[in-house]
Image (cartoon, rainbow, N blue to C red):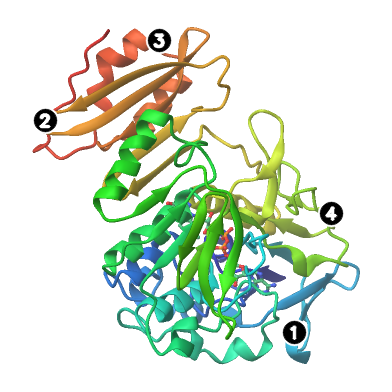
Amino acid sequence: MRIVIVGNGVAGMEAALTVRRREPTWEVTLISEESDHFFSRTALMWVFSGQMSHRDIEPLERDAYERLGFRRVRARATGIDTVGRQVSLAGGAEPVPYDRLLIAAGSRPRPGPWPGSDARGVGHFVTLQDLDWYEREVHGGASRGGAPPRADAHVRATADDSPYRFREVAAERHGRLARQPSVIGGGLVGIEAVEVAVAAGLRPYFFIREEWFWPIALDPRESRWISDQMGQHGVEVHLEHEIEALETDSGGNVSGVRTNQGRYPSDCVVIAIGVMPNTGWLAGSAIELDERGGIAVDEELQTSAPGVFAAGDCASVRWFDGTRRPEQLWYTARDQGRVAGLRLLGDTPRYDRGTWYNSAKLMDIEYTTAGLVNWNLEREQNWYFEEQGRVRSTTRVVVQDGHVVGFNMLGRRWDHTVLIRWIEERRSLDWVLGHLNEAAFDTELVPPLRVTRA
Ligand SMILES: Cc1cc2nc3c(=O)[nH]c(=O)nc-3n(C[C@H](O)[C@H](O)[C@H](O)COP(=O)(O)OP(=O)(O)OC[C@H]3O[C@@H](n4cnc5c(N)ncnc54)[C@H](O)[C@@H]3O)c2cc1C
């Protein structure tokens, strides 16, 4: 049995490991354009800020391919022949035949729609090659340890529109490093691009179109705290700014950001306005995509082509509300990868999207969310509590039809498994507030939260 997987991110690698656990002799081939090794995309910022090396963010030992008998193909896949059952590769390389195929090609950054979005000195913060670009703009090279990925030989076969291409660096043309970066787009990737600039001792501009930072996840009170915190770290947060153009100098390097409110000189711009399924290379292959470009899959992650499955950021899966779209999260990509692995083995497991959860650190503020928050604003009632003593925190419990459906917590650490259990048990607000500290995940040095039930 020949198993081929396009993508060695968390979805692709989890699937490969699942297959290998049960079938020690099956041929397993992983194709990846971006990197030789599986790495944690969520940890890119730690490499930029010099706290970790490239090697540190690779969850597996570097001999894993050899040890597990995985064949590695470092190349760009350019299409799938679903009748002849083979994956074509760029650069005239031999196509890779398959019996069962998994597409786990992840996301690509959404390009900027404004004039100047392709100028030198403009980039994203999603791929290893983006990290390389941003590090060279700001640090003049890799921040710490490990060979930077641009040393890899595969670059030859990379297309101009590939998210894994290496970008020219304005700093190298200027002969000086970027000193005034701008970040456009107020989401999780945007704040990370801002944070790493702060860690490099810079004072970035942060342009956000909305009234407050990350409205899809936070409410205005929560967001104000994050914005204040960014301000204290030297970030200039510009809310309600519509970008009009990225300005360039006579050499084609970015020189500023023009918005509906003014002009801001800038020598490096990170566009972080979201990601989209990385499926452009499938145009012309008989694989059905949805209107967002996600690969349409059924509950068992089967695509429209026999023997072909999809998982992770590129797959449009069914959400709890019946809609179909991609889930662009680490944990869900991992879970889908495991289900896809079982499908590759011939089992028929279903992928069921459990209760939503996520956690992150926004600047130095802990963030945990679980369940439905900012989902159905007309029906949601929010119980909100703010604490400003030894610990600063906010607690938001979302109630719908008399029972708790979601939590949004900042400033303290919470065990999301407990919060999810309460949501699934349909607990009342009173009950949850009475038991809240059972979900606390802080160290014993942090005093317990004492809520006032107004
Ligand atoms: C900066 C940043 C921070 C994030 N932080 C969080 C977080 O805190 N929490 C969270 O839940 N999620 C976070 N995410 C999202 C999370 O990283 C993704 O949801 C997850 O990595 C998706 O995994 P995947 O396996 O689907 O795809 P990816 O990790 O994107 O892997 C895609 C793979 O496909 C390969 N590939 C694609 N196209 C081709 C081709 N044509 N030919 C050959 N190979 C190809 C690539 O080489 C790569 O190996 C973050 C993302 C970013 C960018």
Residue at left 39%, top 87%? 147
Residue at left 60%, top 46%? 327
Q: Residues within 10 Å of mark 4 (few under 14, many from 20)?
A: some
Considering only order in the chain, which callout, 2 or 3, is on the residue closer to the N terminus?
A: 3
Q: Quadrant of the C terminus?
A: top left
Q: Which residue is mark 2?
A: 447
Residue at left 65%, top 35%? 319
Q: In front: 304, or 293?
A: 293
Q: Which numbered dot is residue 90?
A: 1
Separation of residues labelled 4 and 1 (CA atoms): 22 Å
Q: Is residue 24 left or right of residue 97?
A: left
Q: In front: 151, or 389?
A: 389
Q: Is residue 424 left or right of residue 226?
A: right
Considering only order in the chain, which callout, 2 or 4, is on the residue closer to the N terminus?
A: 4
Separation of residues labelled 1 and 2 (CA atoms): 58 Å
Q: Which residue is mark 3?
A: 428
Q: Is residue 125 visible?
A: no
Vertical arrangement, residue 44 with respect to residue 154, above or below? above
Separation of residues labelled 4 and 2 (CA atoms): 53 Å
Q: Residues within 10 Å of mark 1 (few under 14, many from 20)?
A: some
Residue 213 is situated, as x and y percent measured from the top left of the image, at: 44, 41
Labels 4 & 2 near each other (Cβ < 8 A): no
Per the image, label 4 sits on a secondary structure element best described as loop
Q: Residues within 10 Å of mark 3 (few under 14, many from 20)?
A: some
Per the image, label 3 sits on a secondary structure element best described as loop
Q: Which residue is mark 4?
A: 288
